[in-house]
Image: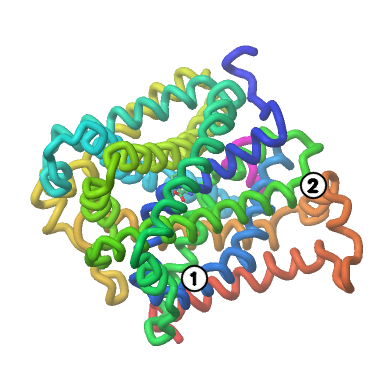
Amino acid sequence: MSTNTRGQWGTKIGFIMAAAGSAIGLGNIWRFPYTVSENGGGAFVLIYILCVLLLGFPLLITEIALGRMNQKGTVSAFETKKYTFLKIIPFLAILTSFMILSYYVVIAGWIIGFLFITLFKINVNFTEFISDAKYTLSFTILFFLATIFIVKAGISKGIEKTSKIMMPLFFIIILGIATRTMFLDGALAGIKYYLQPDFSKITGNVFLSALGQSFLSLSLGMGVLITYGSYLDKKTNIITAAFWVTIMDTLIAIFAGLMIFPAIFAFGKEPQAGPTLVFTILPEIFNAMPFGNIIGALFFLLLSIAAITSSISVFEVSTAHAIDQYKWSRQKACYILGTIGIIFAIPSALSTGANQFLSTELSINFFGKIQTGLIDILDFSFGTFFIVITTLLISIYAGWFSNLTHLKQEITESSPNFNKKIIGVIPSQLFLILIRWIIPLIILIILADIMNLI
Ligand code: PHE
């Protein structure tokens, strides 16, 4: 196969593993647990699950179908001659994916760093590590190079093969660590802290966080599933594939908290560390365990696997775009975009201490929510706000501007039950009501609420 032709998934399970690999990432293991504990515990989990089922799952089906329908990357999937303004959607999606990747690789770089620190018991603490440009830059670049290397190898030989090996390994490690920590003495208090519902904390911003978290976690709104869907053969049942990805992603997110919080409580630590939780408290806990360095290294290996199977999916979005649109070879696209990506990541790598302006002076006030430091600003603007906006636009595009008959056919072709009456409802009709009305309305109400418009 020449580097210029579009690739295809070798097997159905390969596609599911790659899509699940994209979905299951730092969002699940690093971001979800502290977001839950900050936003009302079990009450947030309930809202999150509702967002996933009512919005995330149908949107996942939509994005995959849009991709497969056109057999092209994100931009060409929005085939619209009449409404040129809709062309903004794929560009927003690519921008969002690129900006998310720019800070995601920095956090992934910390993880690779901590993998070594834990395994070899190197004496560097988290604050020292993230404020030292030589550490953050080198590990960020190392991680980015690994991402480029896999994407350069192509769809089935690079992305699919990596995901098929790494995802099962991931499941084994997470199961092993969670069983170990859930049976520690005092673990129950951690589970309570993590999941006890506190409805008094639920505000418009919490809804937005749940929405943003669910979209980010499922890799929606970034063109990932449109791109991955474009490499899918017509036989694969889109609905079951989307179902498995949704279930795995959600269970792993909830499970991640069950792996982390019991350990924190069992060792009498304070759980409020937020985003730094896995880098500050967990290494201490690992230190106190027999063979702690091995368990700790396994934990960071788990996070690295989660991170790389997600970063390759985001990097593939712009690579596919360059291949389809500019007719670049895969290799050329990877080198050029990789260089731009690394340049984009540098400011984030310096924004956790190495550069004072980027770390503590830069801040934005987003409708009363203040974010300081470039990583937090990017994570909020793109990882929560823009991702919600782009996903909203994708839903509006699919529901109102795309060829609905074609879209419905695309899904039905591999899932005949989509158009048959099941317990009194026809799934395809329900699906259309969701993407045309319910999903856009829910998102708009939440956005209006945080902007104090209602
Ligand atoms: N779904 C990923 C996660 O949960 C988010 C992500 C997707 C990040 C793609 C980078 C690229 O971590």
Q: Is residue 411 above or below residue 309?
A: below
Give the residue type at disc 1.
Val
Question: Mark number for residue 264?
Answer: none
User: Badge 2 is on which residue?
Assistant: 410
Mark 2–mark 1 distance (CA, rounded to whole Å): 33 Å
Is the shortest distance between ligand 1 and the CB of mark 2 under 8 Å? no
Give the residue type at disc 2.
Glu
- Of residue 277 and residue 68, the one placed in the foreground of this image is 277
The residue stretch that appears in magenta:
71-80
Q: Which callout, 2 or 1, points at the residue further toward the start of the chain?
A: 1
- Of residue 89 and residue 139, the one placed in the foreground of this image is 139
Asked whether 94 falls inside the magenta stretch, the response is: no
User: Badge 1 is on which residue?
Assistant: 45
The crowd level at tag 1 (other Cα within 10 Å; few <14, some 14-19, many 20+) is many
Q: Residue at point 28% right, 76% down?
A: 368
Q: Is residue 437 visible?
A: yes
Asked whether 72 falls inside the magenta stretch, the response is: yes
Q: Secondary structure at mark 2?
A: helix
Going by the image, does 386 lie left or right of 38?
right
Q: Secondary structure at mark 1?
A: helix
Going by the image, does 117 lie left or right of 208?
left
